[in-house]
Each structure stands twice: as structure tokens, then as C-alpha cells.
Image (tube, rainbow, N blue to C red):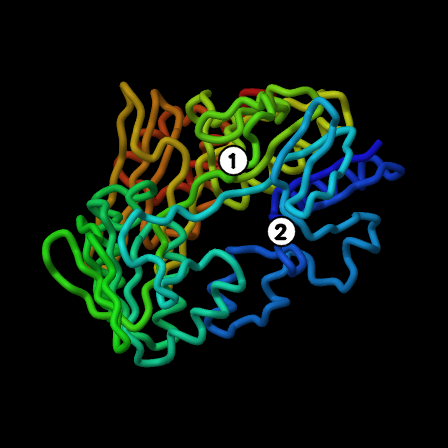
Amino acid sequence: MHYVIAGAGPAAVAAAEHLRELDGDAGVTLIGVQSQPPYSRMAIPYYLTGKVGEEGTYLRRTEDHYEKIGIDLMCGEVVSVEPGTHQVVLADGQQVSYDKLLLATGAEPIIPPVPGMDDPRVQQCWHLEDAKRIIELAKPGARAVQVGAGFIGCIILESWVLREVNLTVLEMGPRMVPRMLGDKAGSLLQSWCESKGVKVHTGVRVSAIESSEEELQVVLDNGEICPADVVIVSTGVKPRLDYLGGSGITIDQGIVIDEHMQTSVPDVYAAGDCAQGLDFSTGKTAVHAVQPTATEHGRVAAANMVGANNLPYKGSLNMNVLDTLGLITCSFGAWEGVDGGDYGELYNPENFQYINLQFKDDVLVGANSVGYHQHLGVLRGLIETRMPLGPWKDKLKDNPVLLADAYVGVNQAALQKAQ
């Protein structure tokens, strides 16, 4: 048996290692486009600030890790999949045969169709090579403009501040991280960033980036101009799917997979940021481009590739935890609420604290918080177990910070009921 994995991110590495654990005699080939060993993009901000060297971004830091456990690591870009012949084709023309294939090609940055994006002083922060160029451009005292304040943007934002640049952040949405935080939470995050010296503009769009030898000028749709020495574009990501044309694999928002992580084509599976899999909260399918989901996808896919599709996936919980300049924000599950549900809320803007719990009947289904991070595990546990809260629901509506007490209380009640 020969397993081939297209991609070399967290989903791919988790799958490769689990395949090796489950099927010790099989061949496992991991194909990554990067010249470096597989690395985590979530570690790039630490590389930018000098907290870690390049090796600190690697997913596995033991020398020759993949070779030692029998994983063949190839450098190449998969440009097509040919299910009829059970082969993938690389950019250099090489063909790699597979018995079973996992597509874990991840996501790619969205580049806005704005004039001036081709200036070399305009950078994305997606690859280690991008980070190295930014380090040269973002010297202390430089004027930096970051376009985008979504999840990834707010991760890398801290890097610019620690590099002592003069930072302006532009977000076209009505608040920072609009897909993760509600109005109150997003407003608190903005106030926090501004208190740290970051200029934040929401509800604005970039019309053009004008270049001269001396500087860049970021022109906004309201006529305002932001001068810059470097522009960082962080306007979201999309699944990498362009290589699948003619493969017959069903694509929607991402690669559509069933409960066993299999695509519409036999012997081809998908995992991670490119995969559109089951959403735990809605029962529908969605792309959850976060590392915990990618890792879980990879392990479940590997188990099904080896075990003849005998491990159904329970669905991924929409979960985001973000540290921005020391302020922890998070969202879990159906944080915007559900039809017929209700909520409990605590808002303490003076201390940059906010928590909102969303309920369906007496079950916790989602949460949004700022400044409360002691009970993130409890939040996830209550949502994923769908445990009835009983009288604890009203207590949490009155005081949402009683999460730990509620967790203990409902578990004790369940134990007593079982006895």
C-alpha cells in the first residue's frame, strides 16, 4: 500500500504520522511545496519578532524526523490529480502513483484586486520567505500599513508592534475580526490595540496603492491617504483548489468530503484548510481554516484510509482563540446565536472584559469572550458534550463567569443520575 499526501501543513503531517502508526509496512509520501521542512504558519509572527529562529517554526524539530519514522518527504507542487490512473502530477512533470491519496493542500491568501499590489514593498505574510522580506522592510520606526484585521491579521499585528514600527490597520468590516467577534467584543479589541499605539480604521476599503521611490501611499475609498514604507496585506484566505480541474472531485467552498473525510472520488480523501467537512454546531458542511481542525482532520482521514472507512467524523467545532498584544479573545460554536435561543452577557469595558454565552433550550451552543481565558477548556467541553445545564442555565445567564461551577455542577448531577 502506498499512501500519498499532497501538502505539508498540520493536517498533512498529522495524517502521515498516523498512517505510519496504523500501517507500519506501507509507503507514506508527503509532498510539500516549501523548500523548508513542514512548518506552522501560526509560528511566523514569533519568527518575525525574533522570539524563535526558523527552526522554531517547524512542526517537528527533531533532525531527520520524517526519515527516521519512514515518511518520504518530497519537495514539489501538485498541479493535477488523475484518479483514473491513481497518480498526481507535479509542476516539474514528475508523476507519483498512489493507492490512496490525501489532499491537504491548505489555503492561499486572497489578494484584493487593487492597483499597486505588485510593488515589492507590498507583502503578504504567508510563507517564511514573506517573513524574511518583511524583516528587511519593517525596521524600527518604519511606517507600516496592514490591510485586514481578521484572525490572521490580528495574529501578525503583534509582530509589527514588537518590531517598533508605526502601525496603521485598515479593516473593511464594521469591526476587527468580524467573523469571530460581535460588536462589543470587536470594539473592545480595537480600543485595546489603540491603547497600545496602533491606529485602527474600520469600515474602510483600499482603492489603490500609489508608489514613489520615497514611499507608498495607501489611498482609501473615503479619500484619506495613509503614507507607508511597507504594506502588509492580510485580507483572508481561500482553499487552494486550482489544481483539481478535470479531476471529477466535487468542489463547493472547499473540497467536499463525507463523514469519513472521503471526496466524491474513490481512494481520494481531503483534510485541513482545503476541505469542506462536517460542522459540529450546524450539522452542515463548512471550511474551518484553523490548526486544531486541520490536525483532527488529518488523523481521522488517516484512520479511514487504513481502516476501510470505519471512523465517522463527529464534526469540527468552530473555535478561535486569539492573543493580540496580550488580550485574549475567543469564539466557540454558534457564537452569534441560534433561532429560538437566548443568551447571557457580561460587559466590563473599563477592564476590557466581555463574555456572551448562547443557549438553545438549556444547552450551551456558543460563546464569545474578551479578557476571560481561564475557562476556555470548560467552554469547549460544555459545548461539545451538549450537556443539559438544567438550573445552571439561569445561573449562567445571570453571571456568565460561573462556567467552572456550572461544569462541576452538571457533571455531578449527571453522575448522581447514573447511579
Residue 264, given in percent of the width and then of the height, sits at 60, 19
Residue 325 shows up from this direction: no
Q: Nearer the viewer, residue 255 or 395?
A: 255
Residue 375, given in percent of the width and then of the height, sits at 44, 47
**Which quadrant of the view contains residue 297?**
top right
User: Which residue carries the number 2 mark?
Assistant: 33
- Is 264 positioned to the left or the right of 332 in the image? right
Q: Find numbered disc 2 in the image and state the secondary structure of the residue it sits on.
A: loop
Say which residue appears at 20% left-offset and 50% top-offset: 205
Picture layout, residue 156 above or below residue 22: below
Quadrant of image for the N terminus: top right
Picture layout, residue 281 above or below residue 231: above
Say which residue appears at 53% left-offset and 29% top-offset: 255
- Is 149 positioned to the left or the right of 75 in the image? left
Q: Nearer the viewer, residue 269 or 224?
A: 224
- Disc on res. 241: 1
Picture layout, residue 232 above or below residue 213: above
C-alpha distance separating marks 2 and 1: 15 Å
Quadrant of image for the C terminus: top right
- Please, what is the three-letter code of the amino acid marked with disc 2? Val
Picture layout, residue 196 above or below residue 246: below
- Disc on res. 335: none
- Please, what is the three-letter code of the amino acid marked with disc 1? Leu
- Is 325 positioned to the left or the right of 172 in the image? right
- Lower position in the chain sequence, tag 2 or tag 1: 2
Q: Nearer the viewer, residue 350 or 256?
A: 256
Residue 39 shows up from this direction: yes
Say which residue appears at 26% left-offset and 41% top-offset: 182
